[in-house]
Image (spheres, rainbow, N blue to C red):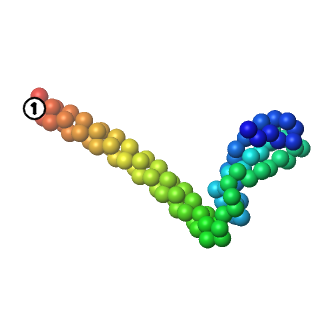
Amino acid sequence: MVFCHCGKRAVVRTSWTPTNPGRRFYACPDRNSDCRFIDFMDPPMCQRSVQIIPGLLRNINNLQANLSQVQDDHARVKKYLIRTWIEICLFVLFKIIT
């Protein structure tokens, strides 16, 4: 276990800064304290990783946004299809009755 300067058990966080993307570190659990304890859990990343990871993360975020849009479109089309089938069935039923 790792403890911060104020004696609390440090929590693991992930850095998303340009110089340490995805690098885990220990930090004080109280973000509002003046402790400012930081101790890296992961070793430093090579320069190539530092250059590549932000682009990969952007791609993942874009793909997740696209997936969300496709799921919304799918739900909308499904509702439209169900409504259309109900209208067709009602129309046919009405024609049979009259």
Which of the 4 image quarters holds residue 34?
top right
Residue at image coords 59%, 63%: 53
Residue at image coords 70%, 47%: 13
Left/right of residue 83 with respect to residue 20 in the rendered view: left
Looking at the picture, does residue 94 appear above or below residue 35?
above
Left/right of residue 32 with respect to residue 76 in the rendered view: right
Residue 76 x/y as whole percent: 38, 45
Residue 11 x/y as whole percent: 73, 41
| Residue at the far right in the pictured view | 34
Left/right of residue 36 with respect to residue 66 in the rendered view: right
| Residue at the far front in the pictured view | 1
Looking at the picture, does residue 31 appear above or below residue 62?
above
In front: 87, or 74? 74
Instruction: Tell me the quarter of the image containing the N terminus.
Output: top right
Residue bearing the label numbered 1: 96
Q: Amino acid at mark 1?
A: Ile
Instruction: Tell me the quarter of the image containing the C terminus.
Output: top left
- Label total for image: 1
Residue 12 x/y as whole percent: 70, 44
Residue 16 x/y as whole percent: 68, 56
On the question of residue 10 being in view, the answer is no
Looking at the picture, does residue 41 appear above or below residue 82?
below
On the question of residue 34 being in view, the answer is yes
Residue at image coords 74%, 46%: 26
Residue at image coords 33%, 43%: 78
Which of the 4 image quarters holds residue 95?
top left
Disc 1, SS? helix
In front: 10, or 34? 10
Mark 1: few/some/many CA within 10 Å (<14, 14-19, 20+): few
Which of the 4 image quarters holds residue 2?
top right
